[in-house]
Amino acid sequence: MWLTATKQPETFRRAGELGMNVLTMLAGISLEQLAQKTALYREGRRSAGHDPDTGTVTLMLHTFVHEDIATVHRAVRGPFLDYIKTSLMSHLQGGAVDVGRQLSAQEIDQMAEYSFERYFSTAALFGTVAETRAFALAAKEAGVDEIACLLDYGPSVADIRANLPFLAELKHSFETVEA
């Protein structure tokens, strides 16, 4: 059984108490904040009599790994910007975000650009094997047991196939390093 937990620390603790695994993401939080939440998860497991070293924390990350950073940018930029804009428009139209007025196309583009840069550098596995390895190992140090690599943002099938050998290399280095 998995419980999705993101921002509320108590949700992490409760998942541990219930003996559940955790599915999480870096939506508005840093790896440092996630480390605090995974510690609460382990404490919750311990306090309820569950082995704190068992239970799995899975971190969902948008992913694209390649040996050439320019290839990563080309493969990710267009589809991920479109993905962000679609998500942003959905939140605006659904009333989840109230800005008090209609945003212009230019303002939406600027927000999407800002989000893209943030994700690319701090909240996704976008980059070379060496760059993404460093991020993945930092996630492991934060208490993450596994990474769910998301390709839901729309890269082409050819780009996904080109990404797979590098992703396999990254997976191997993540699994063989002790936390």
Image (cartoon, rainbow, N blue to C red):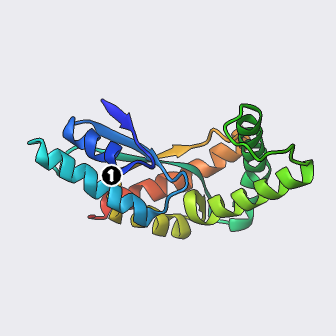
Q: For mark 1, does the 10 Å Cα neighbourhood hold few (<14), some (14 to 19), or many (20 or more) residues? A: some
Residue identifier under label 1: 145
For image coordinates 40% across by 56% down, the residue present is: 172
For image coordinates 68% across by 41% down, the residue present is: 153
Res 161 quadrant in image: top right
Q: Compared with residue 91, is residue 164 higher up or lower down, i.e. above or below?
A: below
Q: Compared with residue 87, is residue 1 higher up or lower down, i.e. above or below?
A: above
| Residue closest to the eye, 172 or 21 | 21
- Residue 57, image x, y percentages: 33, 47
- Residue 54, image x, y percentages: 19, 46
- Residue 29, image x, y percentages: 50, 58
For image coordinates 26% across by 54% down, the residue present is: 40
Q: Compared with residue 151, is residue 77 higher up or lower down, i.e. above or below?
A: below
Inspect the image, locate mark 1, and give the three-letter code of the amino acid beneath it: Asp
- Residue 109, image x, y percentages: 85, 53
| Residue closest to the eye, 163 or 10 | 10
For image coordinates 33% across by 61% down, the residue present is: 36
| Residue closest to the eye, 19 or 64 | 19
Where does the N terminus fall, quadrant-wise? top left
| Residue closest to the eye, 112 or 161 | 112
Res 50 quadrant in image: top left
Task: Confirm whether residue 86 shows in the render.
Answer: yes
